[in-house]
Image (tube, helix red, strand yellow):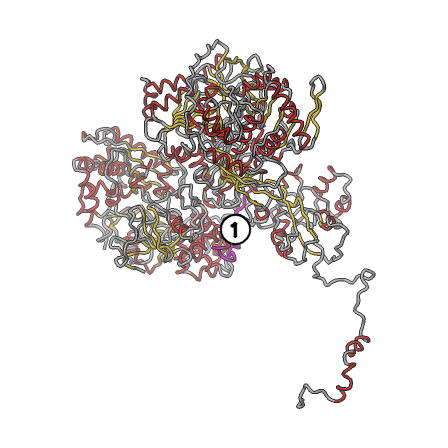
Amino acid sequence: MTENPKKPGPIAEMLAPVAGFGVTFANLFRPVVTEQYPFEKVPTKPRYHGRHQLNRYPDGLEKCIGCELCAWACPADAIYVEGGDNADLPEGAHVSPGERYGRVYQINYLRCIFCGLCIEACPTRALTMTNDYELAGPTREGMIFEKDDLLAPLREGMLAGPHPMVEGTEDLEYYRGEITGPTQAQVDWVRERRPDDASLDAAAKATVAAPDANGGTR
Amino acid sequence: MTTTTDSQTPVAVDPNLVTVTIDGIETAVPKGTLIIRAAEEIGIAIPRFCDHPLLKPVGACRQCLVDVAMPDREGNVRPMPKPQPSCAMEVSPGMVVHTQKTSAVAAKAQHGVMELLLINHPLDCPTCDKGGECPLQNQALSDGRATSRFTDVKRTFAKPLKISTQILLDRERCILCQRCTRFSKEIAGDQFIDLQKRGASQQIGRFDEDVLGFAPLGDATVGPAAEDESGRAFASYWSGNTVQICPVGALTSAAYRFRSRPFDLVSTEAVAEHDANGSAIRIDHRRGTVMRRLAGDDPVVNEEWISDKDRFAFHWQTAPDRLTHPLVRDRAEDGTRGELRTASWAEALEVAATALAAARDAGGVGVLPGGRLTIEDAYAYGKLARTALGTNDIDHRARPASAEEESFLGHAVAGHGIDVTFGDLEKAPAVLLVGFEPEEEGGIVFLRLRKGTQAGRTRVWSLAPFATRGLERLDGTLVPTAPGLESEVVDALATGTDEPSLAALREALGAQGALVLVGERLASVPGSLSAVLRLTAATGARLAWIPRRIGERAGVEMGTLPGLLPGGRPVSDAAARVDIAAAWDVTELPTAPGRDTDGILAALAARELRGVVVGGVELGDLTDPVAARAALEAADVVVSLEVRASEVTDLADVVLPVAPPAEKSGSYLNWEGRVRAFRQALESHALPDHRVLDELARHLGTDLGARDGNVLRKEIDQLGAWDGERVAAPATEAVAPAAVAPGTAVLASWHLQLDAGRGQDGEPFLAGTARKAVARLSAATAEAAGVADGGVLRVSTGAGRIELPAVVTDMPDHVVWLPTNSPGSAVRAALGVLPGAVVQITAGTVTTTEEA
Amino acid sequence: MTSLTPILTRSWGDETPWKLESYEKAGGYEGLKKALGQSQADLVQLVKDSGLRGRGGAGFPTGMKWGFLPAPDGGPRYLVVNADESEPGTCKDIPLMMADPHLLVEGVAITSYAIGSHHAFIYIRGEVVHVYRRLLKAVADAYAAGHLGKNIHGSGFDLDVTVHAGAGAYICGEETALLDSLEGRRGQPRLKPPFPAVAGLYARPTVVNNVESIASVPAIVRGGADWFTSMGTERSTGHGIFSLSGHVTRPGQYEAPLGITLRELLEMAGGIREGHELKFWTPGGSSTPIFTAEHLDVPLDYESVGAAGSMLGTRALQIFDETTSVVRAVSRWTDFYAHESCGKCTPCREGTYWLKQILHRLEHGKGEAGDIEKLVDICDNILGRAFCALGDGATSSITSAVQLFREEFEAGMTQPASELFPPERSALFDYTPRRSAGAAAGAVHA
């Protein structure tokens, strides 16, 4: 370009009035990107920040220990947690392994900005985010999700809590992933107290042996 | 590096000041100051764990190591070869200190110690109650390494150990700074926990054979830590302080365990309501609910300590029986009471005002405000009684009281301002306790006295039937005194005696700064308060009256006694009446002598008085609960201002709910006479007493001007104290002690700090640390009654009986002691008598069950 | 050439030397009688002049220690004899009290008289019951003979001696921990100041001396300061017991003037065991940095040993020949310190716990990269940071061993010490390998 770039050529000058349609015409022949939501639901990227989930250990105990670090990390003050003491539960039952569990867990989706800082803060990987983005509702109250709304459903073979921890283990074994499923003793415990528990049958089929108490190094 | 001090010109002129240089900043501090404090003064924070300003240095954690150089004899500043613990080393002239900020050696030493502290510390922070307000956490971040090099095996212990129902110990988290054991030993004197084992296995604990893994050796040589009569170790009234000063989460309280996080809490400075000290506290609340209370830092009152009662007993304010709405009871034509029903404020006030006006015109209305009021509330009660109700029949003393006591209060307490202070307690060379158990009835008073005795400054004598554990920990001297004989012994001291121990005591009381502390119990010993006044006059010792309840002194000062107007003005003094009448903008004040609590109740029963306004009064606290109940039943109208439903509620015609302390602002007046103002911690619709009284008065056609507490305070301040003639000193004769027939004994009794009081409701963990109720009597008395030590003793009167385990105690014969209001021992309700009365004692029949 | 100078050990070979009559026959208690005729100040001056330095390890001048006591104020003051000999390798006080307890009793009487104490305590290690009994008997005999008790030998001086057995804690050899233990408290060192000379036992002025120091006093009183200073070096005067143990032909206690060398001592002891050569040795017990064959000619006095980088300590010479693994030896010593740490201060309590685990790892050939640097740095974080000398002592063998034998520690990354140096080769007796189960476990259980 040796010419003055500001000065268009004669052809360009001629087409100038319709040049603005160039983009339009070009796109007429490209594939459509409009998503027909809600008629067609397109999967998100795998790491999309969607609705939260409170996870469980393979034996069905909750991972959340009610430490409130997610609430502390939350820049929007959308999370409210109250802790509880597993020792206060009857007959040695546990909601989560260890001493503390999350008694109250609420996320206010009217405030949540899906930044994921809560996920980073969670020391037990209890809180993760799903790809579920359909978060709308008719009432403000309904947008405050309680623990029941957030808890991950029991996977096949998990035993619904509260029930005792795997015999001979402490929270450390759970953190290390040494618990791979409910044990017979846990199933028996639940069967004795909640014979109608829906998760019993599947859990009874999926029982595993407790990790060897002396096997691991502490 | 060596420099000479020759070139420096001495700055310090005051010989008591020492000039030191810390991180290049020169500062002058008093001699004996620790380096760590001198650094604090100039804003240099040195990390520390074992150091606590109110405990003696121990130098155990080694976190506060700093580089120190000192001038030698020639004046050359020579660095010390090793870094020194700044928490244990006093400054010396010319000392040059380099903290972690300016010395690589100190910084390395601190990093090293921090790393070592963390190697065995569990990664509990997410579950730990201390997380977020933990000195270890904070200082690990500010003065520790970013990563740990520890790849080895951590020391583990079984998770929390209950060392009492309230206190839980997590030994893994403990960094063995010994703050708790030092507090227990140096401050509280309850050494139930101590270090045990050694090296990395060293741990805090009670001497529990199960924990230590020792074979049981029988009870001859070793055993659990010394237990009190409750049978519980670490049953200390002060145990909560160890939780607060623990620099990690090793000690936690069952009441607060996992309840919240520091970052959800809103803190409000407040004043504790459970005893007459008005200790500074901090209320931590979340979403309108109090989660915990901590000791505030008030050097002139409670320093940094509070009793467990002040710390843990707060659920009473939100108990299920809390009154939230005004209630009105309709009566049938014949006067029989119907059911209480919820009413609007307007209706309830109208009903109350109408009925009170009728009762006032028919005979009169008495006022029983109760002993837990703020200054503002007490003043409003007094003003209501003397203006709207036109009576002097007002008495806040919801306990055994006497005319002698009223004269005593009017003469020696009211209008005296701040006289004896907490500071005086720890400096007094001699302290005589009469009718007063400092630990059970005085709270922080006990710790202050103990501070004085521990420092070797103070000696304590007590006129009591036996030496309590509290007195033993004060290294106190018991002057064995059977109940009722206090006046005799005090008079013997006042007039001089040949008895050597009493003569020594009398001489000690002549020393500058000697104190006589009397408790509210003396009201039921005729002549004793008169004798105490003679004693202080004779010896020059100063006098302090230390009641149990926070509102007693406010009542005395604000004129909720029949014979006293605000500021110590005697009702009988016309000038005083004119004074107050002018201030209140009324033409005149009632002149007829007022009745005291017992008098009001008797007059109600006799239908001389027709109505009564009752504040926070428990009938069981009164001299004769049965008669009190009958008196209220006989009244035409009972208006009750209460926080929670009580026995009075059952008899009330109108119940007006009022705010508990956390839901109002106001000012308590502690026993010193110090104003203890506090702000409202929780948002609430509940009204303070003075506002309710203001509304009630308005419905009675009078303006109390008590709507706004601040306005009220201004009015009170403007009134000031009375400068005229005071109430004359009482000169009541002592009553000859009753004869003790075989099978009977004289009753001694006082309240335990933790007992069946309603202020401790809803606190099972706290109740577990209370002392168990026992009956005490001498070996000879027990033998005569046919009871062995530990057996069941039955104490009975015509009104009823109490059965408790007997504990043989070194005390005068023919005396039996019972706790006044503990589980299984409600003396006034069950026996209907006061200390000094003669009761029957026999062996009991039932075996007692363990009191939870 | 320095030779044996049996003074404290003179009677050890005799028949029943522990009996009072044997002791008196050999001139025992003459020193006491002589001392009682002198003024107290003269006695203190005599000991000052003799240059006697504390034999308990630190080498603080004994006379100066006595001189630190404040002027008498009418209240009690105490002499406490530290007989809690527990340092690995140290074995001099126990045999001394076993063989010749009256020497100590006489020393106690003279010292008490010199410092104006009317009640002396001997705090003896509780494990050595036979010595405890012998000492009790000696004290009882001395009372009966009028060497102790009221108005001793008509001098008007009263003295009570209490023999107290400790309960088995190394830390109670630290003087303030000893005082706490003696008072019936938990044996943990006290904050200084106040020093024991100002506020020691029961918060009264107290002198705490080692057994050997006190036992040296009667001879000084009898022989005079000049006699005493004629032995030893200029600043380390007198004689001392050298305890040789380990791979020597004739282990035992050799009393000699300070300043003797290991070479000379080894000659007396018949040398290193047959067919082996010296590898390393401790000059003053396990708390002192180790020496090697290079240091054979270092004069064993306070100054020379200090200049060579170690400490004379308690003259406990533990001799190790070339069959010994340094890592293993240091690891054992560290086990000892981890076990004996009182727990009061962080560096010692946590540091020894950590050192022990790293050393066990190295000993078993499972060392990790950086372990040696970590070891040295942890030692640096303990040395001079701990509350008392126990923590310092725990580090000195480690740092010196890493300096001198680093390659052995490096070998510990891959090869267990038991392979490099089979234990049966260094054992002096039939060796039965202990089961290795749990050898690596460092967990402390509740």
Residue C265 drawn at (x, y percent): 29, 53
Query: Disc 1 is attached to a residue of which chain?
Result: B
Would you identify the image quadrant in which residue B685 lies? top right
Residue B151 painted magenta: yes
The outermost residue toward the right is: A39
Q: In the displayed structure, does residue B34 sit left or right of residue B206?
A: left
Q: Which residue is depicted at the point 66% across and 38% down?
A: A89
Q: In the displayed structure, does residue C369 sit left or right of residue A104?
A: left
Residue B253 drawn at (x, y percent): 55, 39
**Mark 1 residue crowding within 10 angstroms, few (<14) / some (14–19) / many (20+):** some
Nearest to the observer: residue A11 or residue C182: A11
Using the rendered image of the protein, determine whether residue C170 is visible from the camera's viewpoint.
no
Residue B306 drawn at (x, y percent): 49, 36
Q: Quadrant of the N terminus of chain C?
A: bottom left
Under circle 1, the secondary element is helix
Q: Amino acid at mark 1?
A: Gln
Residue B570 drawn at (x, y percent): 46, 24
Predominant SS along the magenta part: loop
Q: Which residue is depicted at the point 31% across and 32% down?
A: C137
Residue C110 painted magenta: no
Is B851 rendered above or below residue B833? Answer: below
Nearest to the observer: residue B34 or residue B64: B34
Label 1 sits on residue: B137
Nearest to the observer: residue C336 or residue B89: B89
Magenta stretch in the rendered image:
B142-159
Using the rendered image of the protein, determine whether residue A201 is visible from the camera's viewpoint.
yes
Is C64 rendered above or below residue B229? Answer: below
